Image (cartoon, rainbow, N blue to C red):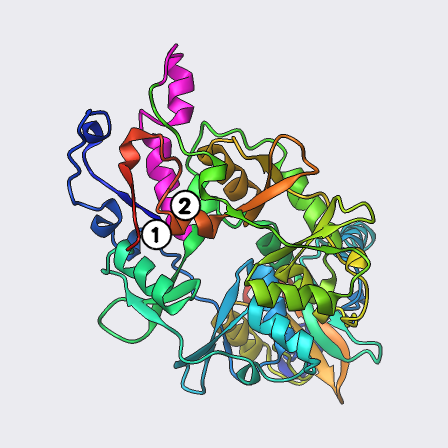
Amino acid sequence: MPFGGETMKSTATSIMITEFPTLLPETPITEAIYIFRESTRQHGRRLFGIMVTDKDRHLVGMLSMYDILLYMRPKHIQVWGTMEDLDVAGLIEAAGRRIKSILVGDIMTPDVITIGPNVDLLVILDIMIKKHVRRLPVIKDQRIIGIVYISDLFNHLLERIGD
Amino acid sequence: MFFAFYSIHQSYLQSEPVMVQANTLRNLSVSRAMRRQVICLDQHKTIDHGINTIIKHKINALLVVGSQLQPIGVVSKTDIMGAYYAGLLIDSPLEYIMVSPPLFCRSTDSLETALEQMRSNKVYRLYVTDGHSEDPVGTLAYPDIVGLLYQYCHQCEYSHLNRKKQDNESDPTHRFKARELMTTGVKSIPMHETLSTVMDALAAYRFGAMLITNESGLPAGVISKTDLALTYKHGVTPLVTAETVMSTPIHTCDADSLLEEAIKTMILADIHRLFVHDGNKNQIVGVLSLSDAARGRSGSCHGCISSRIKVEDQD
């Protein structure tokens, strides 16, 4: 594929993924975890964040791996984390049991930065760095039309640099 | 009654104790115990968003900030429960339910001063500034103080844990037990009552959680303010019965459990309170929370000689 000149694709549209799973806020976290694993298996790429929509398919949040890990983190680990002689067996399993009553909407990140389809790749790069985000939903006419992952942006830029 | 720490180990063992008026908490600064993460939200964010933040970060309250990011209020789980009880729309802004102003202490203040500030203002947390600016650099809540003291006692050669390692045949230490710091007179609500009734009782008794009983009057579950915040978020009417929302199993300990062990259970398992029974789990005689332990200045155990505790009359 030629690079450069008029054929160069430099906007969100060029690298966004257009087939993606979504979640509802009412979805149990356990089901979301299953979708994370299943999507990774089906699409051959590790998924670390899934968009959350309402029933009208409007974006209402993002559930990321970080959200789930944040909820699993023991509240008082700064107290006992350095006590090597404590018996902490079963704590991970206990965290797993606690998360069963939690829904996607309970721990998703509601404030999601989005971009339009014509946003330049370097602007996307800037947003991702400044805002510490690894994925950006692409919205057109209030509808989700895709998602840009930092890995795709990175790989795209590597190809451009290497050309 | 309240308990104060004293700094001379041997004083506790002497027949006529000489208590040195050097309070351990007074010598510890807030910076040693505070959490260096301040979770805040804009005043215009919704209550729904606030619940999300509180649940995800496992905090009991969040700091509400204005347009210039200046702290202007606090929204706690109690405030959220109030909104639920009052039927406030969950999309209402946090500013509707926040309590103003937030209370601050300095990172260099003594823990004793901070505890007194919390007690006299009847608040469960303070926000911490570094003294150079008004920007909050941390939060201080009762469990943080208990956690710090537990760390000290965990390292202490007189601690229950280390005593066991030393395999001493006799242990002269008089150790605190759960019954000595628990709150007695636990109230309960039958499981067929509504969440509104549960919230009424929680507000009336200023409890963080309510024991729920079955048809036979036996303990069946617990409803905490966290459970109620989630129920509110899930759009459940407060007219449903307690049974549909209560958490099980009930986390309990024996009244004769060592306080050190009870605190360890709570901080390991992310539990704020244990219901205390007298040998029979169906007979709840009290509740022991991390806040109780902090207010009692008992980091891990009274018996641990290094904790230098003396019981005094509050007056």
**Residue B262 seen anywhere in this rendered image of the structure:** yes
At a point 52% along the width and 50% down the height, the residue shown is: A75
Mark 2 residue type: Gly
Q: Is residue B127 magenta?
A: no
Discs 2 and 1 carry the same chain letter: yes
Mark 2 closeness class: few <14, some 14–19, many ≥20 residues within 10 Å = many
Q: Which mark is residue B33?
A: 1
Mark 1 residue type: Ala
Chain that bears disc 1: B
**Coordinates of residue B168 in the picture (x, y in percent):** 37, 12
At a point 72% along the width and 49% down the height, the residue shown is: B221
* Position of A91 relative to B221 (above/below): above
**Coordinates of residue B166 in the picture (x, y in percent):** 37, 14
Of B207 and B215, nearer the camera is B215
Q: Is residue B153 magenta?
A: yes
Q: Is residue B2 left or right of residue B61?
A: left
Q: Quadrant of residue B94?
A: bottom right
Q: Is residue A83 left or right of residue B137?
A: right
- Residue that protrudes farthest toward the top in the picture: B169
- The stretch in magenta equals B144-171
**Of helix, strand and loop, which one carries label 2?**
helix
**Of helix, strand and loop, which one carries label 1?**
helix
**Coordinates of residue B274 in the picture (x, y in percent):** 57, 44
The quarter of the rendered structure image containing the C terminus of chain B is bottom left
The residue that label 2 is drawn on is B147
**Residue B271 seen anywhere in this rendered image of the structure:** no
Of B282 and A66, nearer the camera is B282
Chain that bears disc 2: B
